[in-house]
Image (cartoon, grey):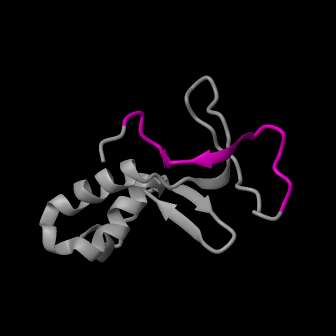
Amino acid sequence: LNIARGNSRFADYLECETEDRKFLSMFGVSWGLISDCDLNSEGIRWAGFMRVYLYLAFRIAVPRAYSGKIYYLPADKNGMSVAKLPDINEKMPRSWNLIQGKFLAVYACKQSWLDY
């Protein structure tokens, strides 16, 4: 109703960029095991809500690792960090941290806790 009334609110989004796409999220972005279990279990939809758990058991038995790089800007003393996201083809500023390697699951979120 706020939109219909012409009211607006500030929003805080998480921005994630790959070589192919750019994502905006209000809560978080997942990559790896969580996404695999959600999206790749569609083939066993006949199992109902248990499909995700069945696929999770399969992925634990036969894990899949993804190579990648994750750059992040550490929060300041107040728990905040505000910065312009550099273009994916630009060199990252020194103030950003890098984690590089093989990952089973990555979940970037703005909350101090996660319940998936």
Seen at 46% across and 59% down, the residue is 25
Q: Nearer the viewer, residue 2 or 73?
A: 73
Question: In x, y percent, where is residue 85?
Answer: 70, 55
In the figure, is residue 68 to the left or right of 42?
Answer: right
Seen at 81% across and 65% down, the residue is 89
The magenta-colored residue range is: 90-113
Is 82 rendered above or below residue 1?
A: above
Is 73 rendered above or below residue 29?
A: above
Question: In x, y percent, where is residue 5?
Answer: 29, 73
Question: In x, y percent, where is residue 58?
Answer: 33, 56
Q: Nearer the viewer, residue 101 or 22?
A: 101
Residue furthest out toward the front: 61
Seen at 48% across and 52% down, the residue is 12
Q: Any magenta on residue 54? A: no
Question: Number of labelled discs?
Answer: 0
Q: Quadrant where the N terminus lies?
A: bottom left
**Quadrant of the image occupied by residue 90:** bottom right
Is 74 rendered above or below residue 53?
A: above
In the figure, is residue 67 to the left or right of 56?
Answer: right
**Quadrant of the image occupied by residue 23:** bottom right
Q: Nearer the viewer, residue 24 or 57?
A: 57
Q: Any magenta on residue 110? A: yes
Question: In x, y percent, where is residue 96?
Answer: 75, 41
Q: Nearer the viewer, residue 39 or 54?
A: 54
